[in-house]
Amino acid sequence: MTTPRQDYSHHVRKHRHAGVRALFVALGTLFVALGLLGAFLPVLPTTPFLILAAACYARGSTRFYNALLNNRTFGPLVLEWRRHHSIPFRVKVIAIVLMSVTLTASILTLSERPWLQAALAALGVGLALYLWRIPSRDRPRR
């Protein structure tokens, strides 16, 4: 059984120029593609790209915006951000763990470049702290 499609057109504030709307749709589509890649590659984050795609679609196309927010897989992530400015706790933990594994593997393969290892480690710690600080409404209580 499928859930009924919601209409989120009240979120959309299209730009008045058609060329700018087309640019927003193109950027939104690029961000969706990057988000899809991020679902399979731990180096790329999925949720931020989908949030950016939704922001672009909200300025460019009601149809694309509604399609993204009604998507069973990605729509709930974007809606959670839009409504509560939070990321589900499980998504946050998975992102941090996969990013840590990927960066650790990269650091270990760059053994002859210590400055690059340090830069990657600093980037990883910074990104992990940033992600951890984003609120999660469903975070388990201690």
Image (cartoon, grey):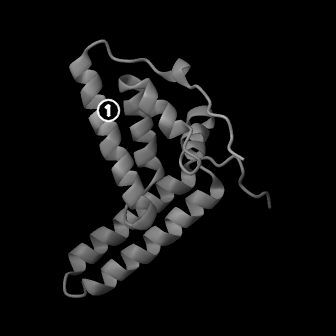
Q: Farthest front residue? A: 1
Report the label total: 1
The image quarter in which residue 117 lies: bottom left
Would you name the residue on which mark 1 appears? 25
The image quarter in which residue 85 lies: top right
Residue 101, above or below 28 = below
Q: Residues within 10 Å of mark 1 (few under 14, many from 20)?
A: many
Q: Is residue 8 something that shows in the picture?
A: yes
Looking at the figure, which quarter contains the C terminus?
bottom right
Residue 114, above or below 19 = below
Q: Is residue 135 left or right of residue 48?
A: right
Give the residue displayed 32% in from the left and 85% down from the top.
108
Give the residue displayed 24% in from the left and 22% down from the top.
20
Q: Is residue 119 left or right of residue 98?
A: left
Residue 137, above or below 36 = above
Q: Is residue 85 something that shows in the picture?
A: no
63 vs 141, nearest the viewer: 63
Residue 107, horizontal then vertical, whole percent: 32, 80
Q: Farthest top residue? A: 16
Residue 43, horizontal then vertical, whole percent: 37, 66
Residue 60, above or below 80 = above
Residue 79, horizontal then vertical, whole percent: 58, 38
Give the residue displayed 58% in from the left and 58% down from the top.
91
Residue 103, horizontal then vertical, whole percent: 37, 74
Looking at numbered disc 1 in the image, what kind of residue is underneath it?
Val
Give the residue displayed 60% in from the left and 44% down from the top.
76
67 vs 23, nearest the viewer: 67
81 vs 1, nearest the viewer: 1
90 vs 63, nearest the viewer: 63
Q: Regarding mark 1 in the picture, which secondary structure is present there?
A: helix
Q: Is residue 88 left or right of residue 110?
A: right
